[in-house]
Amino acid sequence: MLDKITAQEFSQRRATLMQQLDDNSAVVIQSAAMQKRNSDVDYLFRQDSTFFYFTGFNEPDALLLLKKVAGVVEYHLFCQPRDKEMEIWFGYRCGAAGVLENYQADFAYSSETIAEKMPQLLNGTAALYYSFGRENLTQQVQLWLTSMHKRSRQGVTAPVQLMQLDEISNEMRLIKSAAEQQMMRRASSISAQAQVKAMRETKVGVMEYQLDAHIQHHFAINGCAQAAYPSIVGGGNNACILHYIDNSQPLQDKQLVLIDSGAEYQYYAGDITRTFPVNGKYSPEQRALYEVVLKANLSCIEMIAPGTPWDKIHQRAVLIITTGLVELGLLQGDVDELIAAEAYREYFMHKLGHWLGMDVHDVGNYKVDGQWRELAAGMVMTVEPGIYVSPDNNQVEERWRGIGIRIEDDVLVTENGSEVMSREVPKEIAAIEALMAS
Ligand code: GLY
Ligand code: MN
Ligand code: MN
């Protein structure tokens, strides 16, 4: 089984990108930089997703330049120079010679020469594509262009079209290749098994961060050195805080615990949420709300197939959740009117899901030409309906307050329908209770 993206696929991605551009175009993509945490301590390095997508190169302070000249594509890569002293302290660097040998670059240079070399390399290109959202890169581009304009009397011609690269690169990343689908299956599977492990380790008195420790352990043992994002482990009221990452409290009897966690496997994210009872048995109120969220989850997944408009799936979740809340007495009134007034937003305040890929909230437009996008084979999305009853909600009976539930799966759109990649972790109440009792 393929365990990482091959050099051939990285090369194919560069070719596919450049095929879409006119002659005399250039593309510049910047790597991530090291980020300081405190004093002499840095955050763990994580390469920029788009940079990695086109290079497979995992070092900071690098820059990719692709140029198309007379129909021929040139691949230039700037990287950190070899440096004995720095490598003793911070680790091995591939260096320009290593980049030529191992990363298929046609030309390689030290990143210390970027300011001097880029104006030369861009001379004569008509269009320059880069990510407008990268502030640091935008400033560098301005400096290169200024330097080129100053040399116009010497015949230097600077690009006249500055183009948003994201429009093209994001569309490529949105549709996952067969190899990417394999990486994502693995990320989801490891994430699902970690949730099962957490369910087994849950009991009254365990700290939220201790459940996360079991999850991180499972990720690492299975080849995921880093998670895709900090886990959310929220017991009781904490489940109603959507981005709760403190994970600092002890789990108590009669509470639910919501765990939202995902492994990162070879740069691809899992993103799974399960919500289960600390003592192993859902209370009647927890069960009633859980059944509504589960119905929304299952019904939305059923809709996933090529051609389904993105927003239609969200609307299905809204309908099921609003109807359920009316039936249980948490909302009063006519379902259609409540939906029109967005009354459900008090309980379901986020969207049904998002694209999933190298970034947990992955790239790709949700609307095309003003219309909600239709799903297509190779897209991966989450389906994550939820109901969160604030502990301060005085409109409902006390017994409902502080219950927060989300059920999140990772779903690949296939030619004929969908594949739930996170299916190894149960979500039916009976299955979860049986697992926790075993
Ligand atoms: N874990 C982030 C999300 O579910 O969107
Ligand atoms: Mn998600
Ligand atoms: Mn999530």
Image (cartoon, rainbow, N blue to C red):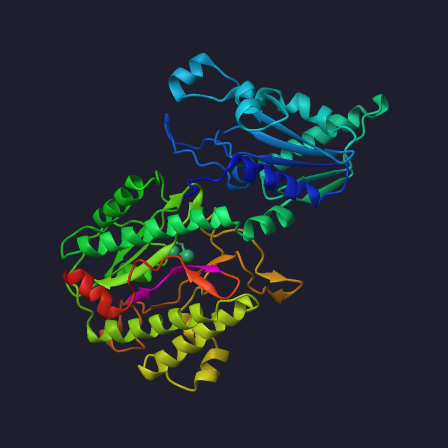
Q: Nearer the viewer, residue 246 or 405?
A: 405
Front residue of 180/195: it is 180
Q: Does residue 403 appear to the left or right of 8 in the view shown?
A: left
Q: Is residue 66 above or below residue 84?
A: below
Image x and y of residue 411, in percent = 44, 60
Say above or below: 66 vs 165.
above
Write down the quadrant of residue 371 in the picture: bottom right
For the view shown, which residue lies furthest in the front direction?
Answer: 1
Q: How many marks?
A: 0
In magenta segment, residue 407? yes
Determine whether 376 is above or below 220 in the image.
below
At x 65%, y 65%, the residue is: 370
Foreground pick, 225 / 117: 225
Q: Quadrant of ligand 3?
A: bottom left
Q: Looking at the rendering, in which quadrant would you find the C terminus? A: bottom left
Q: Quadrant of residue 35?
A: top left
- In magenta, the rendered stretch is 404-413
Q: Is residue 423 above or below residue 268?
A: below
Q: Can residue 292 be found in the magenta stretch?
A: no
